[in-house]
Amino acid sequence: AQSVTQLDSQVPVFEEAPVELRCNYSSSVSVYLFWYVQYPNQGLQLLLKYLSGSTLVKGINGFEAEFNKSQTSFHLRKPSVHISDTAEYFCAVSEAGGYQKVTFGTGTKLQVIP
Amino acid sequence: DVKVTQSSRYLVKRTGEKVFLECVQDMDHENMFWYRQDPGLGLRLIYFSYDVKMKEKGDIPEGYSVSREKKERFSLILESASTNQTSMYLCASSPLNRDEQYFGPGTRLTVT
């Protein structure tokens, strides 16, 4: 069975500062990895995904994530955050070639401080 | 753009009532999912369906049932609502053999 751990439940950061949201996963097989964002009172929206190939994945809104197989991590980064990035971010994992069951982390609330 | 719509954004029901939450997607996706979202617990899968009239239990199916009579529509049913089912309910869909899910805006259900 797969699992996802987001150690930070909340991350405050000043506007224009860099941010890293941490995600670690556990699985006995190859995985696909995702980051979703949820703005207040909305559903989740896909930010980026890793399926195979380059370990550095670029997504929307200037976010990127790096897949590190040896550390079983998929941390999300942005070099300079904006107020509009204030949201909750979810890391998710699924088994590569599986039956589309995706396991989500518990989420990290990013609060951008003006 | 994929559009997933949910019948209500906010719903208030009484304990013991039968509750229907409706979800419709317009992209001909094979897979549909129901999750509940609670603070500190993230998203937990209730049920999913990979075809019309097919359903599979997720991680927390107790107290819920589902119906998928048409490809585009996936309904979540609370047979007898209880206060511990107060939560945000999210519907999602995905194409066959793709794990990328598209979410609706959510229904915030309060059971009093």
Image (cartoon, coloured by chain):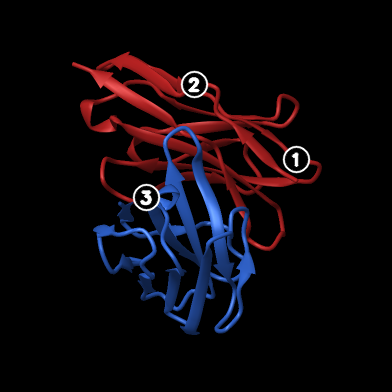
Chain colours: A red, B blue
Q: Amino acid at mark 2?
A: Asp
Q: Is residue A16 left or right of residue B91?
A: left
Viewer-side residue, A83 vs B60: B60
Of the two numbered discs 2 and 1 on the same chain, state the one appearing first in sequence.
2
x then y, percent, for residue B96: 59, 71
SS category of the residue bearing label 2: loop
Question: Could you tell me which quadrant the C terminus of chain A lies in?
Answer: top left
| Same-chain check, marks 3 and 2 | no
Residue sticking out furthest to the front: B16
Residue B17 on image: x %, y %: 36, 67
Near mark 2 (Cα within 10 A), the count class, few <14, some 14-19 or many ≥20, is some
Instruction: Residue at 27%, 21% (x, y): give it.
Output: A112
Please tell me whether residue B48 is drawn above or below residue A96 in the rendered image. below
Q: Which residue is mark 1?
A: A27
Residue annotated with mark 3: B88
**Badge nearest the viewer, 3 or 1:** 3
Instruction: Pick the residue in front: A92 or B54.
Output: B54
Q: Amino acid at mark 1?
A: Ser
- Label 2 and label 1: CA atoms lie apart by 21 Å
Q: Position of residue A75 (x, y in %)?
A: 54, 27
Q: In the rendered image, which residue does mark 2 sit on?
A: A8
**Mark 3 crowdedness (10 Å alpha carbons): few <14, some 14-19, many ≥20:** many
How far apart are the alpha carbons under marks 3 and 1? 28 Å
